[in-house]
Image (tube, rainbow, N blue to C red):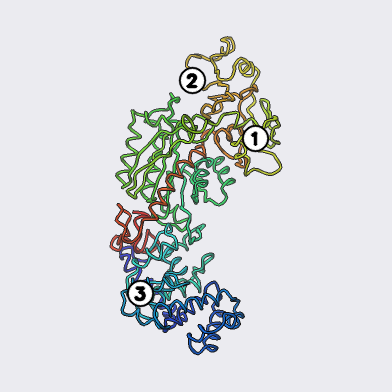
Amino acid sequence: MKSQTASGLESIERCVSMLSSQYGDPLLNNQRDPIDELALILLSDRTDEPKYLAAFQRLKRRFCQWEDLLATMPSDIEREIRDAGMGRRRAELLQQMLRAIYTRFGSLNLSALASMSADDAEAELVRLPSVGRKAARCVLLYCFDFPLLPVDVHTYRLAIRLGIMSRRVSYERSHSLLPPLIPAHLRRSFHVNAVAHGRARCFARNPHCSACPISDYCSHPSAVTPLPIELRPRPLAIDLFAGAGGLSLGLMKAGYRVVQAVEKDPQAAATYRHNHPGTDVIEDDIQKLDPISCLKRLGLRRGDVSVLVAGPPCQGFSESNRRTRTLANPRNHLYQEFLRFLDAMRPAWFVLENVAGLRTMARGKILREIIDRCRSLGYDADWKELNAGDYGVPQFRRRIFVVGNCLGLPIRFPDPTHGVAHKPYVTVLQAISDLPHLESGASVDYLSYGKNGRSLSGYQRAMRASANRDSGVQGNLVSRNNQLVLRRYSHIRPGQNWQAIPDDLLDNYKDSSRCHTGIYHRLEWRRPSKVIGNFRKNMLIHPEENRGLSVREAARLQSFPDNYVFLGSIGFQQQQVADSVPPLLAEAVARDIRDAERRVKSLCSPGCQMPRCQVMDRRKELPTARTSSIGFRCALDGK
């Protein structure tokens, strides 16, 4: 392992030096004449190197000067490049570019660029048809010796793997953000050797890391399941205390790529894996995990993640829990593990979800501590109680969301979409009336959808949209109740609860007056459901059948789509559904964050003056090989 005291700049210099020794600063077929260089770059677009080089040579032999090409027909040009797989369109583009140069400069001569500033010369070139920023910088670097950095897929990929630039920076944005991060005297060598390295071993997928000269500085060799680098990267998310995956599903629907989930419970982890096969699931006690090691499993570094989400165990915070709702319960302090991961991973955003009782737990002490700790870590943070029913979930379910970012942006929460002055609430009827008719103890997991003569509601169509096409659904499991419980059910009308049960049927309750309103509550067709909680404690009753809810009915009321499969015995499935964050609620929160991220990305540039958003020089503080980053990083992508 290399020394951990060298600065990031020294590490960049060392990497460039090692690559230069390996590849010898190759010429890469770049031309000294700027017109030749532009023509070669245009021919090389999406074409194999031997083919475009042969096409270029044929054109040079056929036309003594580029002016001769302007006077010929496109079909004559096409004949010269056809063997390389190029057609009329490429011939026309070449002529258009040359004609634009002649019109703008009075001849096919670009020597006037030498007297311009680098920015002005680049601006002149990118005004030409078919000339982008990479092509313009190649011309200025190789033909005029401007100390610029052309950014192509090879330099982009290498900069991310070395940690010079965050994965959150897209290829398009890297044209602005990467060049200032490479010292001017290293840019030429960095570019030519990065291209040679990318062609020889540093491939997008399955790179040849053995004997790589800079493997000690790269994030890829130590990764268990390395994430591919995307030119247009989706924002990455990590889910702690992930459960069955409701919060993750909402993030995915909002456009996030959930790359990792941590969940201790084997049954919940199995359900998560089944429904999210592309996510790295760590089935372990979070208290035993090192956050940086979790990132390294994926080839990620500090600051690469857009949002860290967590829903720590909440039973101890619930206002209905009178037994363990104290600070003495160690599970009531697991939020500290979230704070540990937040500090280590440095995501741009975080979301912490919990029951509404978090607000009053220890007279608000824990909620205040969470907010204060997040702020001490450099995050602006705020909280709000949200009701799932206000966001299209057919259930009144109050939850606390703590949201924060390290970008200096104001914290916003999603505006309600349902309720007073909005769309009507989604009702139990609209949610589950199309599901199979069942009895107490139903044990056939997969059944055809019910036929009730009603047309499907919009919500039902949305829940069915991704299900199997054979009109069936999984999760038709109902707890088996004894005869006493069934007799109790028969006395309860929609909207009523245990209070409607005759006293002689409640003899086994020591003090029935202490029962909360959710016990033996029969749902109403025309209203949203009460909160889906612990099945055995709440015992919610179907609106018209004398039984509890099936797993699928509860999942529908939580806004899980019908193709979401729950694994384990019925008790484990019920608990997974009850503990989940409703995906539609999670999606609403995630969309607000995603919208804010898009607004920042449209503004951030090397000169951006937004708080904590400008590109920062981190050379003095960053160590070397396989730690956080070796060079510079954009503060937008991690403090």
Q: Quadrant of the N terminus?
A: bottom left
Q: CA distance from mark 3 to mark 2?
A: 74 Å
User: Of residues 53 and 487, which is closer to you in this image?
Assistant: 53
Disc 3 + disc 1, Cβ < 8 Å: no
Q: Is residue 222 above or below residue 447?
A: below
Q: CA distance from mark 3 to mark 1?
A: 62 Å
Answer left or right for 549 relative to 249: right
Answer left or right for 517 relative to 609: right
* Amino acid on which the number 3 mark rests in the picture: Ala
- Horizontal and vertical percent for residue 590? 45, 44
- Horizontal and vertical percent for residue 157? 45, 65
* Amino acid on which the number 2 mark rests in the picture: His
Picture disc at residue 438: none
Toward the left, the furthest residue is 620
Q: Residues within 10 Å of mark 3 (few under 14, many from 20)?
A: many
Total marks shown come to 3
Residue at 49 percent of width and 60 percent of height: 230
**Kind of element beneath mark 2:** loop
**Kind of element beneath mark 3:** helix
Sequence-earlier tag: 3 or 1: 3
- Horizontal and vertical percent for residue 349? 39, 47
Picture disc at residue 516: 2
Residue at 55 percent of width and 44 percent of height: 272
User: Of residues 542 and 293, which is closer to you in this image?
Assistant: 542
Q: CA distance from mark 1 to mark 2?
A: 34 Å
Q: Is residue 421 above or below residue 13?
A: above
Sequence-earlier tag: 1 or 2: 1
Picture disc at residue 456: 1
Sequence-earlier tag: 3 or 2: 3
* Amino acid on which the number 1 mark rests in the picture: Leu
Picture disc at residue 121: 3
Quadrant of res 102: bottom left
